[in-house]
Amino acid sequence: MMLYLRMFLTMAVSLYTSRIILNTLGIEDFGIYNVVGGFVTMFAFLNSSMASATQRFLSFEIGRKDSVKLGNVFSMSVNIHFIIAFVILIFAETVGLWFLNTQLTLPPDRMVAAQWVYQFSILALMVNMVSVPYNAIIIAHERMNVFAWVSIAEVSLKLLIVFMLQWFGFDKLKLYAILIFAVTLIIRMVYGVYCNKNFKESKFRFFWDKPLFNTLMSYAGWNLWGNAASVIMDQGLNILLNIFFGPVINAARAIAFQVKSAVQQFVGNFQMAINPQIIKSYASEDLKYMHQLIFQGAKYSFFLLFIMSLPIFIEAEIILRLWLKTVPEYTVIFTRLVIINILIDSISGPLMTAAQASGKIKQYQSVVGLLLVLNLPISYLFLKMDYSPEVTLYVGISLSIIALYARLKIISPLVNLSISEYLNNVVLRIIPVVFIAFISPTLVYISLEENFIRLLLTGITSIASVLMTIYYIGLSKIEQQFMNRKVKQLFNKIKSR
């Protein structure tokens, strides 16, 4: 619940600030910031692989109740993250800087500003890297309230940045990059102080254990490929679109992906809360409970996302216009296709966590990573044949469906998961909900002229239709009975007051 409180506040602020920043920076500078900042995040794939390993091993040791090993894992993780940060810094200031100056399509008169964005984005990335173990230990201990409150503080500071851009006459693109770095530094210091005061194992000491190092790095090594593939699929396509179409298309894609980020928080918060339980249940060898978490986690993740995304999908054009006023070309189609993609990916989240819990990720990362990275060469071929930019998202949707099937086939023997049970409990519950829930709001959409009344009616009809369809079709009888009990308890509490 704390995570959802965080989500509503951060989503509201993020949507507001995105509109103001787009209007303040202008479409071109907004596109420059996103393509350059996005390019920097490509270097984070080394860090992301280790972050997954850190999260997994910390949760695993908590599940085994081994406090000594837990402290060792934390200290070793901090050491490794410092090493990775140094390696990425060297790579970013050599190969990365060359690519920025020679390969990206940027206006010549904004190259200096782009350099500022690049350098401060690197600094922010370095701060985030060395802070990963501290974030991981908070999530592993399931202190979601702390994570929520600090995130609310972070988004509040970013809201302040929006107003600060109006106060100073300094180049707004440069100032924005500086202020984002400052917020990153403040928030990471807050996480560090909290962990040192509340978790004994987070008191860093220089510790080096070669077998543990090899274990962590072996696990991270296979994660490296999976994370690299994900970065290539995301930021690689951003760069590809920049090369073919310029920064205006990057602005359209950035807006669509901000909608994705906002909507995805509905499922991200739920999965963040359930992931440690999946890993701990595997560590304690309670596979029955683990399977239940996987089925329900996948299904509820999709439903939570679908509730929010259906009205946005149908009324994307008017929502974007009301939000942004100036809507870059291709933003509407990008937004709709991104929503389809994240709905497909949402049911893969618990499967990914199950693979991480097993520790046997070599085949999983190899196959799924290969499928994801294929997005870049396939999209390149279509763009060379003069297809429009949204073809990159059609390719991504197709590969996401194939990747879901691959995950099931690979993970099934690792955790003794029945594919038929997964299909019956998740996929066959989801499909009829989607088709039936679409009917009512679609009828409203095609029957009325575009205006605010239609938007309001479409939103209300969408949410009501999804909720009713989920209850009667998406939930099992046991889940319906559980829901009925909770609703009755809620009404009884209200009456007693």
Image (spheres, helix red, strand yellow):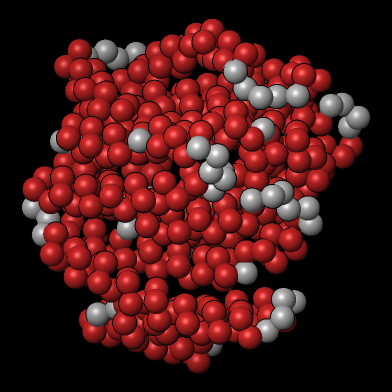
Which residue occupies the foreground of this view, 418 or 4?
Answer: 418
> Residue lying furthest bottom in this view?
495
Q: Is residue 175 toward the left or the right of residue 132 in the image?
A: right
In the displayed structure, would residue 238 be above or below residue 293? above
Name the spot of residue 392 as percent of width and height, x first: 48, 43
Give the residue at x 21% y 22%: 218
For this view, does 95 lie left or right of residue 468? right
x and y, in percent, of residue 293 in the image: 24, 60
Q: Is residue 108 left or right of residue 14?
A: right
The answer, for residue 477, to whether it is visible in the render is yes
| Residue at the spot 25% in from the left edge and 28% down from the top edge | 222
Q: Residue at x 32, y 72 (%)?
A: 431
Farthest residue, direction front: 385
Query: Could you tell me which residue is drawn at 52 percent across and 65 percent down?
Result: 309
Q: Nearer the viewer, residue 231 or 153?
A: 231
Residue 102 higher or lower than 391, as above or below: above
Q: In the picture, residue 466 is in which quadrant? A: bottom left
Residue 58 visible in the displayed image: no
Q: Nearer the viewer, residue 206 or 284?
A: 284
Left or right: residue 147 versus residue 120 is left
Total tally of numbered discs in the picture: 0
Q: Position of residue 273 (x, y in %)?
A: 37, 54
Above or below, 288 relative to 76? below
Q: Position of residue 284 (x, y in %)?
A: 13, 48
